[in-house]
Each structure stands twice: as C-alpha cells, then as structure tokens.
C-alpha cells in the first residue's frame, strides 16, 4: 500500500514464517526508535489469568484447558490444535478478533515515536490487518535456517517444525505480497545494517508526506 498521507502516523505490518527472525528484526527497529506492537504478546495478555479470552476459551473447550493459575494451559491447547484443524479454527475464532481489536486500539493511539511496527505472524492469512496498515514488511530466510532456529528455540524436532511451516503461507507467496522484504540469513551486524537502511527509508517517506 502507499505511504500514509500527510499527518498520518505510518503503520507498518511486519511478518514472516516461523524461525525467520521477526523478533530480532523488530527489536532492531525498536533500538532505532520505532514503536513496536507484538500481536503474540497481546495474545499472551489475553490468555493469562483473568485475561479477556479466558472465559470464552473455558466455555468452548472446557475447564481442563485452563491451568491452576487461571491462565490458558498452553501445552495442552497446543497439543489439541496442532493435530486438529477444526479445533485450531475454533481457537482462532476466539483469539483473532480480540487480538485485532487490541492491536488497532494501540496502533491508532498517539505516540511521539516516528512510526509503528506491528508484528503479525499471520498478517496475510488473517483478515482485518491489511486494510489499515500503510505498508507491509516480510522477514525471510531459507527454510533450512527456519527449521534450525525453531528447533533450537522451542525444542521441537524437525518433523514437527516442518508440519508447522506447512500450515503457513509459502515463502515466495508471502514475499510477493509484501511491500518490503529483509533477508535474515546473514550475521547480526549485516542484518542491523539492512534494518537501519529501511528505517531511514521509512523516515524519508514520512518527511515527504508532511
């Protein structure tokens, strides 16, 4: 999409497959001065003890999916939805609208920071994001790197990581849909250089729109 019009705060959706390095890249943007909104963090807030989503999850899936603290039992729910598409869709029907509403509430609130990065793993799959974001940015890397990083981070074996990747949008399709792309298969110093270049590009866009 085109850059924001004059006096409109620039909103950039950041996405990428599992293990692509979305958090690493968003942290670099934060270091450079961008506001970061992470929808995974919002999801965790919604499903913690007394979170907004807990009542609907309990009613839909049963009390056995709520742990002793009153929060979502993540390992148990992960096991359920991982192998059952219908149950996954039921959970998403609860969470996605709540996450979207909270994300928009934060994103459209005033901030002194120059622009906002909204981190959405399923940016192109979930309806409702692209209509109000001004640009989209994909973090990409080869699939073998995705697998290795995810195994190291999560403890999952390669077969399970590959199953998760198979449920996500293909790399080439995701990259084709994005306005901007950043390669995260190089060293962190090189990655930061690329992020800094995009940061300057976004600042230039903002200056031109004023």
Image (cartoon, rainbow, N blue to C red):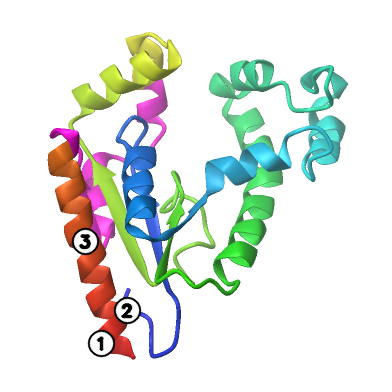
74 left or right, relative to 192 = right
122 part of magenta stretch: no
Report if the CB atoms under discs 2 and 1 are less than 8 Å apart: yes
Other residues around mark 1 within 10 Å, as few (<14) / some (14–19) / many (≥20): few
Q: Picture coordinates of residue 94 (x, y %)?
A: 71, 44
Report if the CB atoms under discs 1 and 3 are less than 8 Å apart: no
**Mark number for residue 198?**
3
Say which of 97 and 119 sits in front.
119
Mark 1 or mark 3, which has the lower sequence index?
A: 3
203 left or right, relative to 168 = left
What distance separates the C-alpha of mark 1 from that of mark 3?
15 Å
The mark total stands at 3
Q: SS class of the residue under badge 3?
A: helix
Q: Quadrant of residue 68?
A: top right
Q: Picture coordinates of residue 152 (x, y %)?
A: 35, 14
Mark 2 or mark 1, which has the lower sequence index?
A: 2
Q: What residue appears at the point 30 percent right and 56 percent down from the top-left corner?
A: 137
The residue to which callout 1 is attached is 208
Image: magenta residue range: 163-188
């Amino acid at each position: 999409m085109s850059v924001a019009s004059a006096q409109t705060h620039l909103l950039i959706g950041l996405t990428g497959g599992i293990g692509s390095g979305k958090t690493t890249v968003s942290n670099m943007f934060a270091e450079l001065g961008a506001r970061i909104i992470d929808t995974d963090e919002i999801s965790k807030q919604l499903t913690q003890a007394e979170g907004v989503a807990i009542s609907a999850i309990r009613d839909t899936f049963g009390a056995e999916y709520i742990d002793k603290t009153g929060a979502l039992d993540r390992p148990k729910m992960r096991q359920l939805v991982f192998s059952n598409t219908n149950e996954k869709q039921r959970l998403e029907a609860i969470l996605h609208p709540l996450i979207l509403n909270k994300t928009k509430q934060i994103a459209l609130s005033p901030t002194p920071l120059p622009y906002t990065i909204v981190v959405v793993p399923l940016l192109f799959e979930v309806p409702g994001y692209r209509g109000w974001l001004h640009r989209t940015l994909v973090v990409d890397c080869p699939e073998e790197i995705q697998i290795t990083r995810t195994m190291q981070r999560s403890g999952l074996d390669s077969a399970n990581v590959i199953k998760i990747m198979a449920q996500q949008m293909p790399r080439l399709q995701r990259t084709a849909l994005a306005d901007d792309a950043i390669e995260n298969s190089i060293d962190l110093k090189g990655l930061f250089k690329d992020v800094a270049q995009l940061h300057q590009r976004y600042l230039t866009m903002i200056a031109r729109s004023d």
